[in-house]
Image: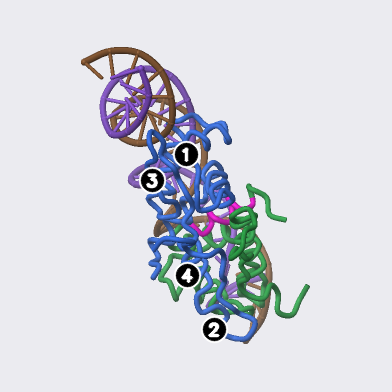
Chain colours: A blue, B green, C purple, D brown
Amino acid sequence: MMSSDGAVSALAALAQGHRLAVYRLLVQAGPAGLPAGAIAEALGLPNSSLSFHLGQLNQAGLVHQERQGRSLVYSADYGAMNALVGYLMENCCRGSESCAPAGGCASEPASA
Amino acid sequence: MMSSDGAVSALAALAQGHRLAVYRLLVQAGPAGLPAGAIAEALGLPNSSLSFHLGQLNQAGLVHQERQGRSLVYSADYGAMNALVGYLMENCCRGSESCAPAGGCASEPASA
DNA sequence: CTAATATTTCCAGAATCATGGAAACGTCGG
DNA sequence: CCGACGTTTCCATGATTCTGGAAATATTAG
């Protein structure tokens, strides 16, 4: 269940050019995700800047963080996006025809 | 076709508590929309503040503005939301199974 | 034309956010 | 233990955003 504050956090996290690029990159990378270094190189961002933005996305619940050896691997949380869109479109048009809840990607391919 | 800047504008427009509330109200109001005054009353916002936020939503293309007599009636643009979600999920998981483009609400009930 | 209604624009102060270099932190190999 | 690697935290500066009262701008009625 998405709260207003949660939705604002998620939207604010995406409402920034670099973070939007990071998120889209992770969406396209799929469940395996990408290590921070690969993201920094792909987007040409300084490490400190990227770390700040990844932190924002993580705190908003849009991405997950997992350590693999020396690397921190980030991956998109598709379920969070689906919840966000569901919140935005909640009770769309007071439930009239041609208003269906949006479904994006499978929430979690293998785990939980 | 949604650009990165357009997506950032739309997300930034929604990434604010009052504006998110306004937008959801308009989504639920349906294509008929609501006059600014009704929105101000429903959300308890000062006129100048609401006008500022409506301007942001309008400039981001998320809502339409139409004069009806003395009132300015605002309505949600469902097509813009669909385009935004499409942009966010573009090429999701590199096109593997269980990744479908999200469809939200009908774009435009009667006009254009 | 004047008054009343509906909404926007103007403005300045307060609060929040983004940036990137340098230093600190966890992790691995020898 | 030590050096190298990958990433985060710290910090100050500059830029952007939000707020709401008062004045200005449309629109309609008499």
Q: Quadrant of the C terminus of chain A?
A: bottom left
Label number found at residue A66: 3
Range of the magenta residues?
B6-15
> Which residue has dot 1 on it?
A35
State yes or no: residue B73 in magenta. no
For the residue carrying disc 1, how many other residues have a C-alpha within 10 Å: few (<14), some (14-19), or many (20+)?
some
Residue depicted at x 54% and y 56%: B13
> Which residue has dot 4 on it?
A87
Q: Is residue A82 left or right of residue B61?
A: left
Inter-mark Cα distance, 1 to 3: 9 Å
Number of numbered labels in the structure image: 4
Is A14 in front, or is A110?
A: A110
For the residue carrying disc 4, how many other residues have a C-alpha within 10 Å: few (<14), some (14-19), or many (20+)?
some
Q: Is residue B58 in view from this perspective?
A: no
N-term-proximal mark, 2 vs 4: 4
Label number found at residue A94: 2
Q: Helix, strand or loop at disc 4?
A: helix
Q: Is residue B20 left or right of residue B31?
A: left
Q: Is residue B105 in view from this perspective?
A: yes
Label number found at residue A101: none
